[in-house]
Image (cartoon, rainbow, N blue to C red):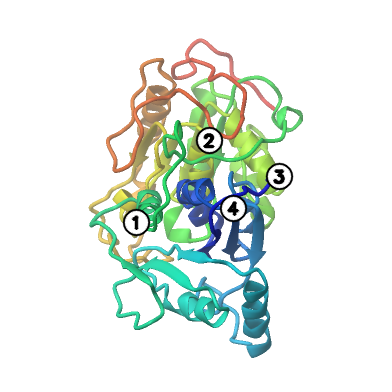
Amino acid sequence: MSARHTGPRTLVVRLDSAGDVLLAGPAVRAVAAGSAYTAMLCGPLGEPAARMLPGVDEVLVHDAPWVGFEAPPVRRELIDALVDCLAARRFDRALILSSYHQSPLPAALLLKLAGIPWTAADSEHYPGTLLDLRHRRAPHRHEARAALDLAEASGFALPPGDGGALALTALPDTAPLTGTDPYVVVHPGAAVPARAWSPARAARAVAALEEAGHRVVVTGGPAEKELTADIADGIALDLGGRTSFPELAGVLAGADVVVTGNTGPSHLAAAVGTPVVCLFAPVVPAERWAPYRVPHRLLGRQDAACAGSRARVCPVPGHPCLDSVTDAQVLAAVAALLAPDGADMAAPGAGRSRRGRAGGAGRSRRGRAGGAGRSRRRP
């Protein structure tokens, strides 16, 4: 993206996963609208998403020792290299975006060492001189809205006509991967196992969707090829390990509905405007992480014993919060989202309109309810 000519040089920091970076998108666009140059500092997992965000002129990558489930050890030479890299770019301002349970202060210290004169972040902890704007996020705020709140408090605003939904830049044509007939995506995996169905439960859902007349496409990353093959089980199209991040975005954009857990593809589907049936384990609150500003249904027992635990592996035998979801509930949620007058489940930050697909997807939604009257297809 070409640089603008007026305003500060601004750095936006979001060091977590691809889903977190996608949720930063509205805040990034607000920053870009008021900046001459906008860079994003992200982690390796977030880099593919950052490269598809509108408004980003440069992507910088750092694997931070204070972020992630398998954080690297602290190495002075890498920290020094990051500080030198940031100092060379002479940023005027920086916004540090983090989740409600994270501290922005390690990043703030490095930004000050890099000579960035003004830094803002949400912080519950005393920042000393590390933050020039210590912002307090509103209670129960969705992560995407909270990030935009910080940008607005820093003097930035979305440009006219930008409604604040998630968005991506142009998507690749993925019809050669999926074919052109309508389809529903099932994405069974998640980086955090507690946020996904068990494999056997996912396989039963795929079979139920196929029996109901839906053509199903199963997606997953390179490490999930065995999982997707077992779940597709010869009746669904298995794309496990066969898509890059932009290609996965294209596959989700072409889907009628995406069925997935509270994981990156849920937010990726929202960023391309595709309705989501989200299997939401209550280990984190849905009010902060539900699919944002896109038609969706949340399934799963939000009153389960694991609620609020932030557990990575389900602590309750039988994984009842998600594996208790029935085929009938899945089929009803998909049918509701496919209906011409399908409306969102009420959730913080949720949009109410199915119009306007993001990311230049360029395909109209194919209206059909529940797959009625369609013959079952094999890939």
Q: Which residue is mark 1?
A: 153
Q: Amino acid at mark 2?
A: Val
Q: Which residue is mark 3?
A: 243
Whether tag 2 and tag 1 are in contact, CB under 8 A, the answer is: no
> Given this view, does label 4 or label 3 mark the residue nearer the observer?
4
Marks 4 and 3, Cα distance to the nearest angstrom? 34 Å
> Given this view, does label 2 or label 4 mark the residue nearer the observer?
4
Q: Residues within 10 Å of mark 4 (few under 14, many from 20)?
A: some
> Given this view, does label 1 or label 3 mark the residue nearer the observer?
1
Which residue in the rendered view is the most extreme toward the right?
Answer: 176
* Residue occupying image coordinates x 41% and y 67%: 120
Q: Amino acid at mark 3?
A: Thr
Q: Which residue is mark 2?
A: 206
Marks 2 and 1, Cα distance to the nearest angstrom? 45 Å
- Where is residue 72 drawn, in percent x and y? 60, 80
- Where is residue 130 drawn, in percent x and y? 41, 79
Q: Which residue is mark 4?
A: 36
Q: Amino acid at mark 1?
A: Ala
In this view, the residue in front, 107 or 192, is 107
Q: Amino acid at mark 4?
A: Ala
Q: Which mark sits nearer the N-terminus, 4 or 3?
A: 4
Tell me the element at label 4. loop
